[in-house]
Amino acid sequence: LPAAARMFADQGLSVPLITTPGDFVSADMDYAESLFAACAEAGVKLVKLGYWHMDADGYWPTLSRCRQRLEGFAKLAEKTGVKPVVHNHSGSTMGLNSCAMMHIMEGFDPSLVGVFADVGHLSMVGEPYPMAFSIVRGYLSAVAFKDLKRKKNQDGTWGIEVLPMGLGVGNFPQVMQILKEIAFDGPISFHCEYGFLPPESIIHQCNIDTRFIQGIVDKLG
């Protein structure tokens, strides 16, 4: 990672955040400390953790275990200066919206742990954007951009479909206005989850998404 970060730096780029595997959920994992140490050496300030899911014994016992695990990550943050961030995600994940996220975060030092707010998933299971960002504002460390909509599966169940930005239910002008008002200066990650496209088309769509958001920024001034 440090060598890769130096290659990016040579091209005028930085690596503000890395994403860990979905099962990276405990500071007791055998590579957790070395991962945080490598991030510190590389100048990476944020680490996106994996996902906690509600266990069979229910929400509150699971929440207690999540907070214990976050405490372990907070100790790594205190040791290395690298902050773990928890990403809100639809489904049975813990912290799926801002209210649920604060069950996890409440009482922790916001300089040691943070929230990775995902606009797409907030659109599906979250609060209205002004409320969602206000709830987690003290912990807001990164923002994820993707656009989603509900879809009905053939078996009658409901799922989620990823769409190019501006074609789903996300209100990105409102989100950008909120981020401007709170003077958010952390990284914004574009989640170009377009696996239904060929690779070269994914790159083109990512560029279109970037221009879409830049157009909103330009209008806001």
Image (cartoon, rainbow, N blue to C red):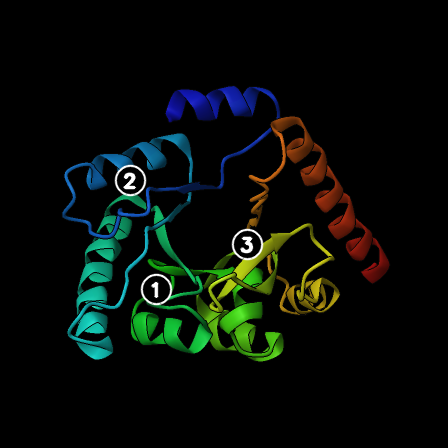
Residue 150 position within the rendered picture, expressed as x and y whole percent measured from the top left: 58, 66
- Distance between the Cα atoms at labels 1 and 2? 23 Å
Q: Quadrant of residue 102?
A: bottom left
Q: Which residue is mark 1?
A: 93
Q: Nearer the viewer, residue 158 or 221?
A: 158
Badge 1 marks a residue whose secondary structure is loop
Closer to the camera: disc 3 or disc 1? 1
Comes first in the chain, label 2 or label 3: 2
Residues packed near mark 2 inside 10 Å, few (<14), some (14 to 19) or many (20 plus) = many
- Distance between the Cα atoms at labels 3 and 1? 16 Å
Position of residue 108 relative to residue 194, above or below, is below
Q: Which residue is mark 2?
A: 36
Residues packed near mark 3 inside 10 Å, few (<14), some (14 to 19) or many (20 plus) = some
Question: Position of 35 compared to 11: left or right?
Answer: left
Q: Is residue 33 in view?
A: yes
Kind of residue at badge 3: Ala
Q: Which residue is mark 3?
A: 144
Residue 6 position within the rendered picture, expressed as x and y whole percent measured from the top left: 47, 22
Kind of residue at badge 1: Thr
Closer to the camera: disc 2 or disc 3? 3
